[in-house]
Amino acid sequence: MRRRRKLAYWLFVRIPLWFVALSFAFVLLYKVVPVYYTPLMLVRFCQGEKEFHRQWKPLSEISPEMVKAVIASEDNRFATHHGFDWIEVRKMLGDHKTKGKKLRGCSTISQQTAKNVFTFGSPTWARKGLEAWFTVLIEWIWGKQRIMEVYLNIAETGHGMYGVQAAAKEYFGVPAASLTRRQAASIAIILPSPLRYNPKGTTPFISRRRNAIVSRIPNIAYPDWVK
């Protein structure tokens, strides 16, 4: 009986307390320290990727057009939600129920950042639970501006490339601070599948998505800190 009580104490008290404490510690650390390495980089390394191209840039050195482009492409309600876009989730479930459409992802930029920084991205419920937990923490502790800064620096943007600075240099020969609206939209297009698409591509899909993002940008509400 005593051993069972001790085991239960560890399972339901000590381990959860350590997890919460470590979670807060890492989130607080990354609020001020650049995120140079992510679990995805380790996964890619194990898959044979040996070189990584990335250069951390503060948000002040990234074109506001890049911020607008990813919000227009990935998360239209980034400025107003608290980590989870329940409006989009309800719309997706409604379309599935009434129109038979396939269930699709409704991850916000906050969720994608939490997934990339704190999980290995495995398609499991455990990972989704971790992602949700860290999404709440970074929304509360980091705030929108820091979330966007981290996202734009750690998002995979091609083979061995992470962050928009590497993408801007590779695809357009300019620093992230100089990206135009169309260039930023081109990079935003590939973020869901960075190993599949090229921002400079001229396929009908790339052209159609680029034009859609460019036309949507003026019609979205952005946080006050977006110039």
Image: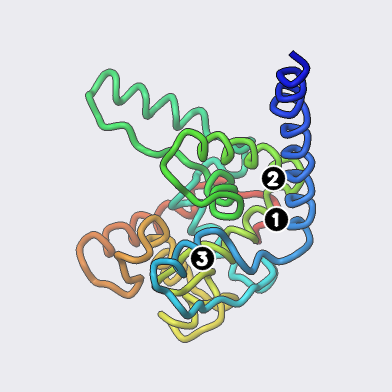
- The kind of residue on which mark 1 rests is Arg
Q: Nearer the viewer, residue 123 or 202?
A: 123
Q: Residue at x 69, y 54 (%)?
A: 145
Quadrant for the C terminus, please: bottom right
Coordinates of residue 169 in the picture (x, y in percent): 49, 82
View extreme (bottom): residue = 173
Image quadrant in which you'd find residue 12 = top right
C-alpha gap between disc 2 and disc 1: 9 Å
In this view, the residue in front, 1 or 75, is 1
Vertical order, 17 against 215 (above or below)? above
Residue to which mark 1 is pinned: 146
Q: Is residue 40 left or right of residue 197?
A: right
The residue located at (63%, 60%) in the rendering is 150
Please tell me in which quadrant of the rendered image residue 204 appears: bottom left
Helix or strand or loop: what does disc 1 sit on?
helix
Q: Measuring from the top left, give residue 66's x and y in whole percent.
A: 53, 64
Query: Circle 2: is it few (<14), some (14-19), or many (20+) Cα within 10 Å?
Result: many
Q: Label 3 belongs to which residue?
A: 41
Residue at mark 2 = 138
**Tag 2–tag 1 contact (CB < 8 Å):** yes
